Image (cartoon, grey):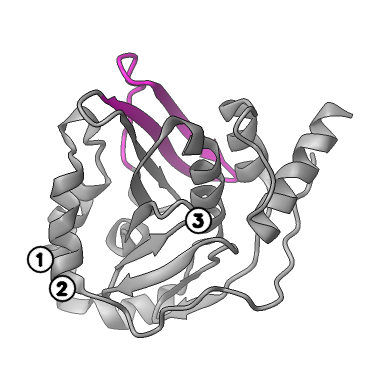
């Protein structure tokens, strides 16, 4: 019964962006979100697509990068590693016992990690969520960690690729693109600062497709 109530609570949050889920155990949130089979996509681009839940806004986008904004005005930096997907490569991750939270992820034949680091000087927490050949990073307050992880889980678990399209897009860019993107996917931990990410917004600006994701969506969360 407790698990069913938790599934319902998370489902309501994903669909509406409303409800208090901050007291929920983080491991339970991850297990429910990543064990679920989400096939939605409300953002489709050349070679890949993904789902952005209500409560998140797409504010800027480059070829394989995007910036999202949540209800608390936190900025999420989203990177997509099409080359590792194309080459079927996985990033090795070792659990970081010095971090606030560290977990290796392996659900539905998709791999990655979630690492959360306390940034002492800012009283913020740095979330690095790499899964399914995508990575989202954000600085949030402690009370906002669970909602951020749910949002990130929705996006990353829904990420899917079109190999035939990517074959035509990647071409000769493979060797030039691979090293930079692969390094982005590695955990930064306490070396990250909020000031670092101002450069990203200055480089990519504001995406013209900015929206509130208010269209009617449905999401299915299946219990094993």
Which is in the foreground here, disc 3 or disc 2?
A: 3
Is residue 216 a member of the stretch shown in magenta?
Answer: no
Picture coordinates of residue 32 (x, y %)?
Answer: 67, 39
Q: Badge 2 local density, few (<14 within 10 Å), some, or many (20+)?
A: few
| SS label for mark 1 | helix
Instruction: Say whether marks 1 and 2 touch (CB < 8 Å).
Output: yes
193 with respect to 54 (left or right):
left
Picture coordinates of residue 128 (x, y %)?
Answer: 35, 40
Vertical placement of residue 55 versus 21, above or below = below
Vertical placement of residue 205 versus 139, above or below = below
Picture coordinates of residue 11 (x, y %)?
Answer: 73, 50
Q: Which of marks 3 and 2 is nearer the N terminus?
A: 3
Q: Badge 1 local density, few (<14 within 10 Å), some, or many (20+)?
A: few
Residue 173 — which label?
2
Residue bounds of the magenta highlight: 91-119
Residue linked to disc 3: 71
Front residue of 179 and 139: 139
| SS label for mark 3 | loop
Instruction: Say whether marks 1 and 3 touch (CB < 8 Å).
Output: no
Which quadrant would the N terminus be assigned to in this image? top right
Residue at position x 40%, y 83% from top?
209
Residue at position x 20%, y 65% from top?
201
Residue 176 — which label?
1
Vertical placement of residue 7 versus 151, above or below = above
Between marks 1 and 3, how big is the CA–CA gap?
36 Å
């Amino acid at each position: 019964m407790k698990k069913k109530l938790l599934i319902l609570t998370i489902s309501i949050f994903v669909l509406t962006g409303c409800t208090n889920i901050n007291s929920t155990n983080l491991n339970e949130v991850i297990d429910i979100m990543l064990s679920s089979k989400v096939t939605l996509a409300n953002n489709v681009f050349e070679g890949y697509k993904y789902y952005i839940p209500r409560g998140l806004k797409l504010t800027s986008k480059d070829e394989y990068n995007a910036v999202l904004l949540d209800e608390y005005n936190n900025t999420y930096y989203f990177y997509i590693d099409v080359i590792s997907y194309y080459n079927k490569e996985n990033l090795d991750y070792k659990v970081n016992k010095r971090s606030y939270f560290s977990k290796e992820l392996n659900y539905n034949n998709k791999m990655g990690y979630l690492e959360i680091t306390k940034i002492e000087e800012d009283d913020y927490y740095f979330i690095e969520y790499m899964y399914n050949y995508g990575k989202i990073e954000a600085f949030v307050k402690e009370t906002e960690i669970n909602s951020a992880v749910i949002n990130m889980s929705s996006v990353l678990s829904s990420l899917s690729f079109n190999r035939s399209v990517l074959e035509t897009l990647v071409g000769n860019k493979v060797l030039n693109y691979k090293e930079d993107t692969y390094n982005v996917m590695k955990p930064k931990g306490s070396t990250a600062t909020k000031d670092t990410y101002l450069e990203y917004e200055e480089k990519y600006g504001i995406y013209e497709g900015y929206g509130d994701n208010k269209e009617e969506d449905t999401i299915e969360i299946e219990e094993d």
